[in-house]
Every structure is written in structure tokens, then in C-alpha cells.
Image (cartoon, rainbow, N blue to C red):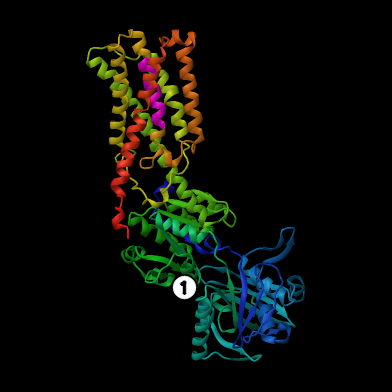
Amino acid sequence: VETLGTVTVICSDKTGTLTKNEMTVTHIYTDGEIFDITGIGYSPEGVFMDDRGEEISPSSIGNLMHMLRGGLLSSDARLAKTDKGWEVIGDPTEGALVVAAAKAGLEKADLEEKHPRLAEIPFDSRRKMMTAFHEIDDSIYSFTKGAPDRLVAQCTRIVRSSKVEALTPAARKELLRINSDLASRGERVLALAMRKWPRIPDDPHPEEAEKELIFVGFFSMIDPARPEVKDAVRTSRRAGIRTVMITGDHPDTAVAIAEELGIWREGEQVLIGEELRKMDEQELRQAVGSTVVYARVSPKDKLRIVEALKSHNHIAAMTGDGVNDAPALKRADVGVSMGITGTEVAKEASDMVLLDDDYATIVGAVSEGRTIYSNIRKVVHYLLSCNVGEIITIFTAVLLGLGSPLTAIQILWMNLVTDGLPALALGVEPREEGIMEQPPRETDEGVLAGGMGVRILWQGALIGLTAFAVYYLALRLGRTPAQAHTMTFATIAFLQLVHSFNVRSTGLSLFKIGVTSNRSLVYAVLASAVLMVAVLFVPFFRVFFDTVPLPLTDWLVVLTFSLTPLIAVEMVKYLKHRQIHPRVPAANRH
């Protein structure tokens, strides 16, 4: 999680991570007409309408029913009614086809019983299509569904008015235009084709089975963007993190969703997998600097994208869910696998498993990573400045010939108890305001970077010199050495407890972030203060720690001087704020 705090690019899958992965068929194109289907989600309730907006009965339109049957038979997903409502078991895209068919009254179990599957050629990311063979009316038909541009290229004929005609170049061009129009709405388009066979092939191969096809139509479906993603993308952009969408979808679909989510803006580059695969490493390194959407890419392309980003010194987080995503997940600085849809291989190869498959959770993890690193710096800041203070107190007193104001047991007590408890509480400090409005830190940035070393020195010197001033004042006022030692011990202990509130933020006032906003620190300081009071007041501890009772006037001196670092640091924060945000004179405000 800490490494996530340095991430400069998040490469995210679209489906299921940026979107809900709840596919719903909204349009079907077949025989030159686009039909609308109402209903959202997996409930098999909805009506069909023609291009005039009039409700129709799908069973009255032969090509539409043929389209729905082909989509249903070539899908393995199933629709199930549960206590939570309707759910899809299987691939969400195929589930959308099953739901669309159910809205037309087609039941998967009944249809499969009438038309059993005889063979299939599974989907793969290279072909971007799959084929299923079924027996229909004593004949063998194959139904192929997949990416429209790939599938249309394999078609030589088309169904028109229940007849099969040759697919002319003009008709092919028109199909691709319709596909582009549907995709530009942000919809995912799936093409369906068929072929009649004299008999089932003995060993069906894609090269033979997926050519000379008859085009049937397009399924166009929506996959709604997750509502929280848009804000998460905006947050990551403010944090100096570029969000990159990687998808196998059509470029128009990818751009439409990316624009809706704020990932893509006018003029930003979109790279298609086919173009990417033609690039050499140098060309790809140049392209990744300005590309925010990758469309029609394969898992192998993901690996090249990650390597190109890393060559630009980017810290890349990459999401993935499939077996083929494992190399890219392993190569990324932060590999993020999907907890719901991810394979075990992907989870093993990743650094982090996303239980809800949600992009917003990744951004939340980046924020958490930055907070963890920030809290580590606060703990180091606190402990080192306290130790510097102790060293300066002792060194100054010894240098001036006044002897050490602290005993060894007192120093050990402060390091273990007075410093220790607040340091632990600072480690769980809540996220600081504005932490996601800062650019990612450099990977080689030291823990003392950003002026923290200087702050440790001057704040430690302030603590040390304040404690020494109390020691010197006690001796000048005629206090016994034992009383002077006790006053110094009490002062430096309370100085450190008060100082723990200073390091909670380098720029924000304690009174702005709230004294009690870190309850753990409040409890830790109170516990340390109670233990310190016990050391100073309980006779047994007095003997052990070489302390003596102090009069009320000495306690007033101790407590007054203990506020010194708080006052000084607050003044410095105020002056820095005024320098960065100067006040505008009243006369110039209008």
C-alpha cells in the first residue's frame, strides 16, 4: 500500500472496474432496422420498440427472433432468481443476451433442449469471437458472435427480409458505420453471424468455421459507469495521477465512456491495439506519454504498455483479472487483481487484490499509501526532534560547566514512555487535508526531504534550549540541584508531549485540524502525562527517578515554558500561510 503513494499512472480495465459490469442490451440491429429494448439490469422485464418508438411483439418479426435465438444459443451464461433479485451466472456480456431473449419469451433451458449444442470454438482475445454449433430442424448451424469489425470482415452474405443476399462493399461499409454510431454512444456492440453446415465438422477450427459467414445483426448494450468513479478520476487528476483506460472494446465505445468519466479530454490520444502492435519500443515509449485510452488491446499489449511507462520513470499500477494478465501484473510497480472476477493466477501475480473490483477503491488505496508514508515521516520528525532537544539540553549544560541536568534513567524514561506513546499514536494519524492535491513523491526521495531535516533541527533546538533555560533559571533562583534536575526533567517531558501536536501537520494549524481529531494521540499524551505525574509525585518513583517535590511556583514555570514549542511553531505556520496566501486589501477586493 505504501508504494501506491508514489503511483503516477493507474492503468485500469474498463469493464467491471470503471463500469458496473452489468450489461443490458438496449438496441438490436438486424435487417436494416434498429429495435429498442427497455429495462435495466438482469430483470427479464422490458418491451421491444421499433425505430418509430412503437411497441412491437418480437415474435412477429422473424429476423429479430432469429437474432435473439442465435445470441441465446451461443451463450453459456444463465439467468437465476435469488433472494436478492435476478442474477446472471457466467459472463455478464452473455448474460445480457440471455436477458434480452427472456424479454421476448425465450427460455434458455427450453431452447437448448430443442436445439442442443454439438460443438464449440471458445473465445480468445486474438480472434475476439467464439462459435457454437447447434442442431436446428434437422440441420446444423453455427452461430458466431464477437467484435463487429472482426466479424463483419469474415462475412460474405447478409440476411435481408428473411433471405440471404451477398454482402456488397457498400453494405459492409454501412454495417461498420452503424457499429461506430452505436459505439460512440458508449455502448458495447457485439455482432452475430451464422452459417449452415451439411454436417458437424469432425474437429472445427476457427480458420475454417469462422469464414464465409452470414451476417445477422448487432447487439448493442450498455454497461453503466460506476457513479463514484468520476469523482475518483477527478481526485486522482488533482493528485498528479494520470488515469489510463485499457479495454478490448471498440475505440468509439472506449472514448465515450472515458469522456463521461473525465479520463479523456478533447485532443488527448487514443491508441488502438492494432497500431500499438506495429510500433517498435521507441515509438511506443513516445506514445504512452500522451495516451489515456487504449482500445482493442490484448493482455500481451498490457505488458508492453507497462514496460513503456516504466521506461518514462512512471510508477505504474495495473489492473487485471485473467490468466494472460499475470505478466503485466507482475511487471507493474503495483499489480492490482480483481477479487470478484479475477483468476487465482492473476491474484497470485498481483501485489494487491481489489475485493470490490472498483476503481474508486484503488484511488482510496493511493490516498491510504500517501497517508502511511506521511505518518512515518511524522513519527521520524517527532522522535528525532525530541532526541535533538535532549542532546542540546545536556550538551549546553555540560559545555557551560553546570553538569548534566538529566540522569540516565530519566533519559531512558523519556525515550520509552514520554516519546514512545505519542509516536505510536502519530502512526495512526488520520489523512491530512490536501494530501490528494499534492503530486506523487519521487521514489528516491529521502524521508527527511521537503525541509523536514531543517524543521527537526530548529524545533529540537527550541525544545533543548527551553529546557536548558528552565534548568539555568532554577539554579539562578537558588533551587537545589535536585530541584533543578526535577524541573528540567518535568519541563522537557511536557515540552515533548506538547510538541507531538505540532508535528501532526507541517502547514496547517493545530486549531484548524482540531486538537481531538486524532483521539489516539490525545489518549497517548494523557497517559504519558499521568505516568509522568506519578513519577514526580509518588514517593516510590521519586526515589527511583531521583526526583523531589516542587512548589507551586516551580510548576507554573514548568507548565508555562512547556507551551513554548506550540506557540513558536504555530507562529511559523501562520507566517508561512500569510506568505503563501497574502491578504488582499479591502480597497482592492472589488
Residue 202 or 73: which is nearer the viewer? 73
Q: Residue at x 52, y 89 (%)?
A: 171
Percent across and percent down for residue 582 are 29, 49
User: Where is mark 1, residue-wise?
Assistant: 251
Q: Residue at x 63, y 80 (%)?
A: 36
Quadrant position of the C terminus in the picture: bottom left
Q: Residue at x 50, y 78 (%)?
A: 149
Mark count: 1
- 583 left or right of 552? left
Q: What segment is highlighted magenta in the picture?
A: 487-500
Amino acid, disc 1: Pro
Percent across and percent down for residue 588 are 29, 57
**Main secondary structure of the magenta stretch:** helix
Q: Residue at x 47, y 17 (%)?
A: 533
Quadrant of the image occupied by residue 287: bottom left
Q: Dot 1 surroundings within 10 Å: few (below 14), some, or many (20 or more)?
A: many
Percent across and percent down for residue 532 are 45, 19
Q: Residue furthest left?
A: 400
Residue 205 appears anywhere in the view = yes
- 574 left or right of 527? left
